[in-house]
Amino acid sequence: MKVFIVIMIIVVIFFALILLDIFMGRAGYRKKAYEPVFSKKKSDIELIHCGADLVERMMKDIRQAASSVHMMFFIMKNDEVSHNMYTLLKTKAQAGVSVYLLLDWAGCRAIKKTALQTMKNAGVHVHVMNRPRFPFFFFHMQKRNHRKITVIDGKIGYIGGFNIAEEYLGKKAKFGNWEDYHLRMKGEGVRDLQTLFTADLKRNTGSAELAPDVWPELPQGNISLKIYATDGYSLEKTYLANIAQAKDRITICTPYYIPTKPLQQALVKARKNGVTVTLIVPMKSDHPLVREAAFTYYSELLDAGCLIYRFYQGFYHVKALIIDDHFSVIGTANFDQRSFFLNEEVNVEIDDKAFTKEVYATIEEDINRSELLTKENFKKRTFRQRPAEWLGKALSYFL
C-alpha cells in the first residue's frame, strides 16, 4: 500500500511539473509571440475545396515560377504525394529558382532524413521549425507552426487547411474523401503572406536574406480582405468580436470543436438573440479524444437551438467562420483550444458578398453529406463513451 501511495505521489508531482512548465513557458513566450494584423487589402481569391485540385494548381504554378518558391506546411510525409512535391522543388532549385521549405518539427517527423538531405543537396533551403528546447521543454514540445503558406514569385499565394500528403487527396481508405478549404490569391494580399513567411523564416533561423524580387509591385484585386496571424494569445478575442457582430447567422466549420467558455457562451447568446447558429463537424475522428471532447459541449448548443451537422462522407477538416451574408474567415485555425492558446496560425478575413455566397454554396454541399445531430440521438450515445468524453474535456487544452 505504501509503495502504491509513493508511486501516485510521484505521478502527481510529475504531471504537476509538466503543467507548471507549460503554463510558465506560455507566460514567458508572450513577449515573443508574433501576431501581426495587416491592413485591409484587395486581391483576387479562388476557393479550392478538393485536395487533388489544390496540388495540381499549386504544382502548375511552381513549374512556372521564375524567381522564388516559398513554402511552409505543418505536415508533409514520406508518401508519393509528398515526394512528387519534393522532386518538383529540387528541380526548380537546380534551375536557379530560390526555393525555401519550412516544416513544423511535430508535423514532419514522418519525412525521412535522406529525403530532407537530398533536397538540401539540390539547393532547397529546408528548415524545421519549433524543435523542443530548454527552458520550458514541455511547452516547446506543444508549440506547433500550423500555418500553411505558399508564395510563388511574390505574386501568387496559397493559404488554407490542406497539408501535402496522401490523406489530404482522399487517397487513404481510413478517411476517404477529405473535405477542406484552401485559398489561391493574387494581388495585394500576397505581400502579407510573403511577410509572414519571411518573419517565420527569420524567427526560426535568425536570417532571412531574400532577393528583392520577392517583393514585386502588386495590383489591387476585386475582393476586400485582411490577413492576421496568431500565436496563442489573440485568436479567442478575435473570434468573440466576429461572433458579436452577427445579426442573422453564424456558421462554424471545424474538425475539432473544443471552444473556450466565453466562445461557447457567445454562441448560445447569439442563438437566444435570434441568430441562426450552425456547426459542421466530422463524423470520423483523426485524433484520440477530440470527437469525445466535442460531445461535452453539444448539449448546451442543442438546448439553445443550434444546428449541429456531422459530415459522414469522408473526413471534415474545414476551418471557416462565416458571419451573415458578407463576412468569411478562412485559414489554418481550428475552433479548438490548441489553436487558441498554443498554435501559430494565420487566417484571412474576407468581406465580400459574392465570395461569401460561394462559400455558403460549398457549405450547403457539405451539409447535404452530413447528418443532423438531434437531441434524441445525442441522448442515445453509449454509456461507454462518457468516460472518454470526460477525459477528453479534462485534456481539452492539449487536443
Image (cartoon, helix red, strand yellow):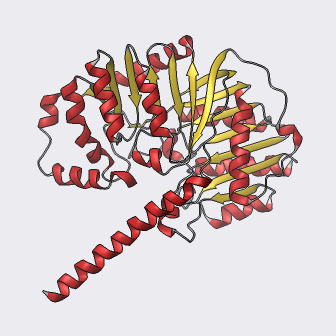
Task: Reply above or below: 364 against 23.
Answer: above
Q: Position of residue 357 (x, y in %)?
A: 49, 13
Q: Which quarter of the image is occupied by the N terminus?
A: bottom left
Residue 399 seen = no
Above or below, 116 against 308 in this view is: below
Left/right of residue 213 with respect to residue 225 in the rendered view: right
Q: Position of residue 137 (x, y in %)?
A: 51, 69
Comparing 348 with 148, the one in front is 348
Residue at the spot 25% in from the left edge and 39% down from the top edge: 297
Residue 340 in view (yes/no): yes
Residue 321: percent from left, percent from top: 45, 27
Whether residue 368 sits left or right of residue 183 in the image: it is left
Q: Residue at x 53, y 54 (%)?
A: 144
Count how many numbered circles sit on residues in the image: 0
Taking 118 as reference, is 191 above or below it? above
Rendered location of residue 195, percent (x, y): 73, 40
Residue drawn at (20%, 35%), measured in percent from left and top? Answer: 299
Q: Quadrant of residue 340?
A: top left
Instruction: From this view, report whether residue 392 is shown above or below residue 188.
Output: below
Left or right: 258 as drawn, with respect to 68: left
